[in-house]
Image (cartoon, rainbow, N blue to C red):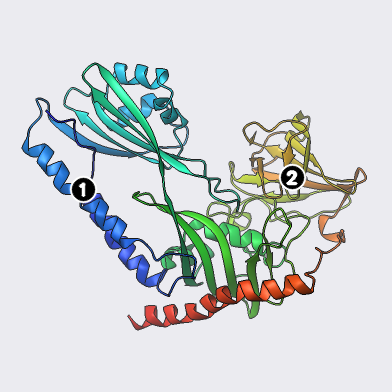
Amino acid sequence: MSPPALPSFPKVATAVAVTLTLAAVTAFGTAPLREVELPPLQTIVESVAIAPALRSAEAEPASLQQYARSERIRRGETLASLLDRLGATDVDFQKFIAADRQARKLMQLQAGRTVNALIDEAGRVQSLQYRYTHLDSESDEPVQPTGRVTIRRVDDGFTASDEPIALERQVAVAVAEIRTSLFAAIDAAGIPEAVATRIADILDGEVDFNRDLRRGDLLRVVYEAIRESDSLDPPTIGRILALEFTINGTRHEAVWFDREGSERGEYFSFDGRSLRKAFLQHPVEFSRISSGFSHARMHPILKYTREHKGVDFAAPIGTKVRSSGDGVVEFVGQQRGYGNLVEIRHRNGISTLYAHLNGFAPGLSKGAKVAQGAVIGYVGTTGWSTGPHLHYEFKVAGEQVDPLSVVLPPAAPLDASERAQFAARTAGLRTRLAQADGIVRLARFE
Ligand SMILES: [Zn+2]
C-alpha cells in the first residue's frame, strides 16, 4: 500500500479560493508595485488540485478508515489537548514528538496556526502537518523564513521532515469608511485587525481613536500582506506602507521610509516630516477589545494631577502594555500598592513605570533592552486598584511629571539627499493611495 496521502481538504480550499477572489477585487484591485507580484491565485488553484490525489488514495481503501482533520491551535494549547480535538489517542505519536528533534517543533504550538492531520479509526495519527513561523507580528521587522513539519506513520514508527516554506509578499490597498467604529469599518472592508492597531500607533499623539472618530471619516491604506505560498492560513500583516485618514475634517497621512543608515524605517508625513515620537502617548495597545472600553467601564482616562502623579488607562484585563520608548528594564516584580510593576529607564534621565499589571511579557527581566512598542506586560488590577487599568508614570530625574507636558527634541529632519530619495521612493505609494478611490467607486457601483 502506498503511504497515506497528506490531508488536502478540497472543500476548505475551494471556500478560501473564493474568498481570495473577492478580496482580489476589493483589496488587491489595482496594479501592484513593481517589486511585488500579483496575489497568487494560481497557487490557490494548485492547492485545490491536490484533490485527485486524495481521491485515488480513497479508491484504494486502507485497512482502517482515515479521517482528514484540521484544527486551529488555541492560546495555551497543549499537545494532549490538540490531539484530543483532532480525535487522536496515540501515545506512540506523543512519544515520538518528545524524542525527535524535527517533530519536536510541533511543541511550539503557535496559537492561530492550523494543524492538518489524517487520523485513522483507531485514533492513531497517520500523518500530521504543522506550519511554524519565526515571524514577529509585533514589529515591522523583516519577515523570517517559515517552515513546515510533516510527520508520517511508517512501518515501525514515524518519520519527520522539516522544510522551508516560501513567503509571498503582497501589497494590499484598502479603503474603509467609518460608520460606527474603526473595527466595524475595517471588518466591512476586509482589512485585518492588526492594520488598525498599527495605524493607531503610527498616528499616536495625533489622534485618539477612542474619541475622535466620526461617522463618514475615511481611511485609505496600503499595507503588506504576507502569505505562505501554499497555506490556507490568513496572511500575516507586514508593514503599513502608506495611509491617509481623514478624521473629523482633518487629514492625517503617513508613509513608510527607510532612511539610509537608520536601524529601522520610520513614518513621515507626505511632505517629509518624521512622525516618530520619542515616547508613545498610549502604552496600552489599541485593539478590538480595548477600543471604547474607557467609555464603558470605570472612570474615563484619569489624567496626571499633582495628587495622582500618573495617567490611568482603563482597558480589559489581558490587553497588551507596551514600552512607550526605547530603553532598558530597571525593575520587574511586585511592589506594594503598585501590584505587578515594570519600570523602564530611557535616555536623558527619563524613566517610565507601568503598574497593576496582570502579568509580565515572557522572559522580561532586569537589564533587558526593550524597543518602543515592545510588549512588556498585560493590563490587570493587582495592587491597590479598583478595576482593570494601567497606571502609567513618566519620570524625569526621578520626579513624576505629566508626559504630555514634556517637550522632547523632534526627530532629525531629512537632509537634501534624503529628501530626494524620499520623494522618489514614496511617489509610488502615494499613487496607490490615490488609486484607492477607484476601489471605493467600484465597491459602491456594485
Ligand atoms: Zn493611577
Residue 377 is marked as none
**Nearer to the camera, 424 or 106:** 424
From where the camera sits, is residue 293 visible? yes
Q: From the viewer's perspective, is 58 left or right of 254?
A: left
Residue 392 location in percent, x, y?
Answer: 76, 47
The secondary element bearing badge 1 is classed as loop
**Nearer to the camera, 321 or 139:** 139
**Mark 1 residue type:** Ile
Q: Is mark 1 within 8 Å of ligand 1?
A: no
Q: Is residue 278 above or below residue 9?
A: below
Dividing the picture into quadrants, the one containing residue 335 is top right
From where the camera sits, is residue 214 visible? no
Residue 50 is marked as 1
Q: Is mark 2 within 8 Å of ligand 1?
A: yes
The secondary element bearing badge 2 is classed as strand
x 18%, y 32%: residue: 4
Dividing the picture into quadrants, the one containing residue 190 is bottom left
Q: From the viewer's perspective, is 441 left or right of 53?
A: right
x 38%, y 81%: residue: 442
Q: Which residue is mark 2?
A: 391
Density class for disc 1 (Cα within 10 Å; few <14, some 14-19, many ≥20) is: some
Dividing the picture into quadrants, the one containing residue 57 is top left
Q: Quadrant of the N terminus?
A: top left
Q: From the viewer's perspective, is 343 left or right of 406?
A: left
**Nearer to the camera, 338 or 264:** 264
x 53%, y 69%: residue: 221
Question: Mark 2 or mark 1: which comes first in sequence?
Answer: 1
**Mark 2 residue type:** His
